[in-house]
Structure formats: C-alpha cells, structure tokens
Amino acid sequence: MPGPQPLTITVTPAQQTVLDGLLRRHSCPQALALRARIVLAAATGQRNEPLARHLGCTAAEAHLTVVEGDASALQTAIATLLADAPRPGAPDTFTAEQIVQIINLACTPPADAGRPVDAWTPRELAAEAVKRQLVSSISPRSVGRFLKSGPPPAASQPLLAQR
C-alpha cells in the first residue's frame, strides 16, 4: 500500500484508563484533551491524515513513552508528556520580592523617605525604588501596573438598595 503507514502506538490498559479519565475531567485543558484523543485514536490504528481531519488538527508524529507504575504516577507522567511545550518570551523583568518591596514602599508615608509630596505618585515611587536600590531601573508605568494589580477597591457606596 503506497503512502505513509499509520503511526503505531500501543496503549496499555492502565494508560487507556488514565487517558479516558483525562477526557472525562471537567477541568482538563482543551489542548491536553485533544492530545489524549489523538493518542487514543492512533492506538486503534487509524492513519494520520484521516485522524487529523476527524479531530480538526494537523497530522503530526507523536512518541508515547511507556510508563509503568501506580495510577497516580502514570497520570502525572501522561499529563506531563501531553502538556504544552514552554512558549518563548522574555523572562520576567522584576522578581516577586522586588514587586512586594515596591508595594511596601507605597504603603509608607512619602515624608519618611524625605520626599516633599503628600502622596506617592508612580514617578516618585519609581525614583525612590531606584534610590533604595530595590531595582536597577523601573518606569513609572510599571510601578502603576504593580499597584493596580492588587485586590479591587471597596465600593464607595453601598451596592444593595436600602428599604
């Protein structure tokens, strides 16, 4: 028979149980569920092209490592194997500790830092954070984002109607 042969995947009964369990979970990410359906369908001997058309994805070759052990270890290994690959992107510029230190600085009175203002502004906080060597450099906009990312403010007026 001409053309590529179907990808042969052997799924053990324990792996089948874990993959079926992933598909039944309400909290299973859709990308993980799609990969689990691909593995289960490939284990039945379906060819790549019809399988891809049926599942609405592109044909790709997959490698399933046989994992043996208890059900919990097997579930973790399969979920890790089918998980999304890390995406490219710039690493975080500021550590969580630096962000907490800047928010802590915003909670202190500006007069304690020798600033001649009544209230902190993002520009003043950025300058003070650099002065105290909390960070090597930071923009006022970044400081503003850190301060806005906290819990939502309380309502200024009651939300329930009075009788």
Image: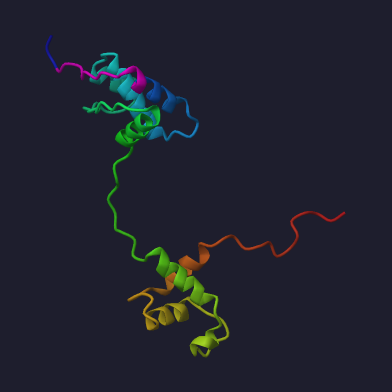
In the rendering, at what x and y percent does residue 147 appear?
51, 68
Percent of width and height locating residue 116: 52, 90
Q: From the viewer's perspective, is residue 143 above or below residue 130? A: above
Relative placement, left or right, of 37 versus 59 is right
Toward the right, the furthest residue is 163
- Depth check, front residue: 106 or 3: 106
**Residue 79 lies in quadrant:** top left
Q: Is residue 42 magenta?
A: no
Q: Nearer the viewer, residue 159 or 17?
A: 17
Residue under the point 35% across and 17% down? 13
Q: Residue furthest left?
A: 2
The magenta segment: 4-15
Q: Is residue 33 left or right of residue 9?
A: right
Quarter holding the C terminus is bottom right
Total tally of numbered discs in the picture? 0
Find the residue positioned furthest to the top.
Answer: 1
Q: Main secondary structure of the magenta part?
A: loop
